[in-house]
Structure formats: structure tokens, C-alpha cells
Amino acid sequence: MIEHVARYPRIRDRSLYIGRYDDLIPERFGPNLPYIPDWTRENFTEIGYVAPFDPAAYADTSALRHRLGYDPDQPLVIYAVGGTAIGQPLLHKAIEAWPLIHRERPEARCIAVTGPRIDPAALPRYPGLEVRGYIHHLYEHLAAADLAVVQGGLTTTMALTLNRRPFVYFPLKNHCEQNLHVAHRLDRYQAGVRLEYDNTNIEQLAEVALDTLGSDVNYYRVQALHAARRAASIISELL
């Protein structure tokens, strides 16, 4: 791809980077390959992070919970692992940790979202835990949560970062984007608690979850407003 861009620059009328240049990991693409920040600056225009919502619309957590049908005074935990089945082991581990969490926080409620590839009926049930196959506009429910346990995907973790919600995330093993690029961006925003699936047992997950549940966050604010408008403005010049 790097060679293609260099040989055929005319192929691309515009190249946009969804993020800020400072979000880029300060590494090379590989041995004898370009330095990622320099190459991106030369070939892409940064536009900021594009989100499908305005974080200001979810700043009032109590009002949001009331609108979504949650008890504003009940701690809310959400487990979500994306749209594939690869997150099923993580979902199982998180669910098995729930009784330990619930023992310490019996007033809390947990919702585990399976997505389209995991059968909700195949997952265990515990008091205080609800398993759902699908939640429309999941980012709204994550914005209402006191804790989210998720994989290390960019969309979900950035939604939580934008809405300044406490979360624990597990990058997929050997997944380049989640372990390097996404983790670097989250570190820059000082967002989330990173854990490794193979090195975290049920008791450890419960302990971290209890420490993180409802904790105050001080994430670096993401400059997300008007990013889509900037992208549209740049694209419209072609039309």
C-alpha cells in the first residue's frame, strides 16, 4: 500500500485521517519502512475523530438513564464484545466474574450484549445479570454505564472515552490495531484500564471491575466536534 501510494498518487483525490496526527503511534510501519507519523502527515489530512453523536447530549447521565429505562440510582455495568463470535471467551469470563462483583455491589445491575454471532441462550445466568442479543444504539447505553467491559476495538472504546465513562478493555491477542494503534490512542487520552485476557483470571477481573465501577475519570478530551463537517467540506471540493 505504501508503494502504491508513492507510485500512483493520482489515484486518490483526497485522503483523510480520522483522528489527530498526535494519535499516531511513533513507530515505523516495519523494518526499512516509513515512520508512521511522518508518512501520514505527507499523505493524509487530519480531520479529528468522527463520532455518530455529540457527547454533550449524554452529559446528563441521570436524564439519559431515565430515557433509556434504567434506574438512575442503580449502578449499571455493561459487557459488550462486538459483532463477531471472537469475543465469546471474554464474555464468558466477564459473566463468571459477575457473581463476585454482585456480592460486593448487590444493588448493581449488569447487561451482557452478545451481538449477532453469539447465542444468548448459551451463556450462564446469574442474579442481577441480563443477557441481550442486541441493543440498538449501544453507544447510548454505554454512555449511561458506570462500568463497561469491552474488547479493544476503536469504535467502542472511543465512544466510552468521548462520553467519559469508566471502562476495562481487552485487546484481542496478536491483533495489531488493537494492541498497538488503539492502545496508543487510549493511552494518549489516559482512558480505560487495559487488561490481557490470558493473564487475567475471574477473581482479578472482578477486583479490577470493582475498583473501576463508578470511578471518577479524568480523560484527555477528544476533539470530535465538527470532524464530520470538516470531512464533508474537504470531500465537497471534489464535487
Image (tube, rainbow, N blue to C red):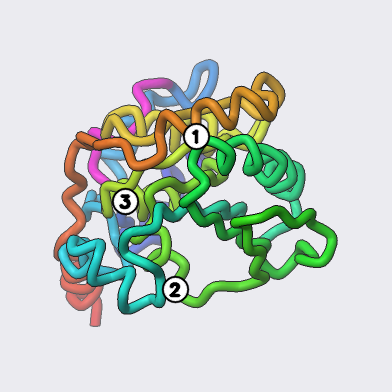
- Mark 3 / mark 2, whichever is N-terminal: 3
Q: Does the magenta stretch include residue 16?
A: no
Residue 6 pos. (x, y %):
42, 42
- Mark 2 or 1: in front is 1
Mark 3 lies on residue: 17
Amino acid found under the numbered disc labelled 3: Tyr
Residue 45 pos. (x, y %):
23, 51
Label 2 to label 1, Cα distance in Å? 24 Å
* Residue at image coords 66%, 55%: 127
Q: Check disc 1: other Cα within 10 Å, few if <14, some if 14-19, many if 20+.
A: many
Q: Give the range drawn in magenta.
A: 19-27
Residue 97 visible in the snapshot:
yes
Mark number for residue 147? none
Mark 1 lies on residue: 209
- Quarter-of-image position of residue 232: bottom left
Q: In this view, does 193 lie above or below 143?
A: above
* Residue at image coords 69%, 47%: 91
